Image (tube, rainbow, N blue to C red):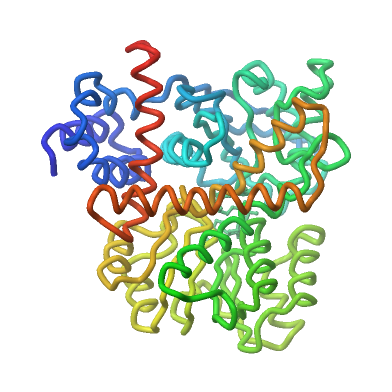
Amino acid sequence: MDKYIESVIEAVKAKDPEEKVFHQAVTEVLETLEPAIKKFSKYKENAILERIVEPERVILFRVPWVDDKGEVHVNRGYRVQFNSAIGPYKGGLRFHPTVNLGVLKFLGFEQIFKNSLTGLPMGGGKGGSDFDPKGKSDSEVRNFCHSFMLELNKHIGQFIDVPAGDIGVGAREIGNLYGMYRKVTNKHGTCVLTGKGPTYGGSLIRPEATGYGTVYFAKEMLKTIDEDMKGKVVTISGAGNVAQFAAEKCIDLGAKVITMSDSDGNIFDPDGIDREKLAWIMELKNVRRGRIKEYAEEFDVEFNPKSSPWGRKCDIALPCATQNEVDKKEAQALVDNGAIAVCEGANMPLTPAAIEIIQEAKVLYAPGKAANAGGVSVSGLEMAQNSMRYFWSREEVDQKLHQIMVNIHQTAYNTAKMFGEPGNYMLGANVAGFLKVADAMISQSYLM
Ligand code: NDP
């Protein structure tokens, strides 16, 4: 590895030794930037790598809230405002017990390059809390969201930072957060959050956007090898927002989805999850907030506790749950079972060792920052619609989303080719995302 790049990675590790997933994300991105750093000396001369790995600002705060028994609990809230060179910070909020600063720095770092790839003016950020919404009542979740926004409102705004959802933050949470924002600030219509409900400023297709976008990206990759989604067998992990709409788009395009999962295990439906069964899953997860194993009982199929779906024979794998869910063993199983494409709906679901196995086997591989950029893209379109005081139809938004995903694919594909590694979408996406942000930082002086 180039000595300059290596020294930056080592410095990141030495500074915050416990932030392992952040180190992983930084290493993965910086390693692939080598050809660009060698080709253009300006990035080293302007210390771009040293600057880009350091967040512009981190906000850490106390979130006290009261449960249904009247007991007070305290969680920790965060917002990592990572890079605003090309636009206001933009990125989701994650509520999950595993959240800590290292996780949010990894997600915020990835978001910089993802948002750059969309072609829209959005910087990178991420936030959230170690609060676990699982098993909490609606009123407990509401109390938590209200307390979280009582602090967060001071740090966000349409020209500053525009959060959205992520794991554990969906329509219910965004509604509660937005309600408190309005109560405190007496402002409406300024796009301070995206993923809002359609009755109060949300864009149509935003809930669908990440999952749909992932499948649009997979479709573009398949085109390069004269293949199509139709008739393909697809394994999906997760049963949340991204997984649900990835499954829906696969079904629309004539593919057969045979697995979905949650943190308890996965269901295997050899006949395929059809539209009716998927509607049942959406009701289970979004309304009843139940567990995926209930699907196995309802439709009399296999439930595999505490295991992943990656051992199943499939053509296409869409990991849509969480980081590092596909390691060496699972990647090897995908290769052995003849998968032709792995497209990341989640953020960093493949470990570095898994990526190596997939790439060496010449299986098409799309990194999350390209493949799951549809969500933030439609968030960008929500900001645009709110600014115009106007709404586009479902068809208009979906058509724009589709075009953005085609453009991201083309950009990553062409950039990989230009830097001598055709088909390496990881390199293409990282380099293309980086160049725009780095050039914006140089233009705005060393203070950026
Ligand atoms: P949701 O909370 O809606 O769903 C997450 C799903 O993944 C659930 O089924 C959950 O199961 C499962 N899951 C979460 N953590 C784990 C774990 N440690 N082990 C096994 N399963 C787990 O989140 P989203 O669908 O919104 O997000 C999924 C992924 O997509 C994340 O990586 C997120 O960062 C990424 N992403 C999301 C975007 C969006 O627009 N929502 C945009 C871009 C990326 P359980 O309920 O049991 O926890």
Locate ligand 1 by image quadrant. bottom right
Q: Where 50 falls versus 267 (above or below)? A: above
Q: Where 293 falls versus 58 (above or below)? A: below
Q: Where 51 falls versus 232 (above or below)? A: above
The picture places residue 72, in percent across and down from the top left corner, at: 71, 32
Q: Is residue 406 left or right of residue 298?
A: left
The picture places residue 320, in percent across and down from the top left corner, at: 55, 60
Q: Where's the C terminus, which quadrant?
A: top left
Residue 68 seen in the figure:
no
Give the residue at x 42% y 47%: 411
Nearer to me, 122 or 132: 122
Q: Is residue 182 left or right of residue 154?
A: right
The picture places residue 314, in percent across and down from the top left corner, at: 48, 81
Furthest residue in direction left, as rendered: 3
Image-quadrant location for residue 300: bottom right
The picture places residue 275, in percent across and down from the top left corner, at: 76, 75
Residue 245 seen in the figure:
yes
Image-quadrant location for residue 148: top right
Q: Where's the N terminus, which quadrant?
A: top left
Nearer to me, 435 or 101: 435
Q: Where 336 falls versus 411 (above or below)? A: below
Image-quadrant location for residue 446: top left
Total labels drawn: 0
Q: Is residue 19 left or right of residue 405?
A: left
Give the residue at x 43% y 41%: 110
Nearer to me, 261 or 342: 342
Give the residue at x 65% y 42%: 165
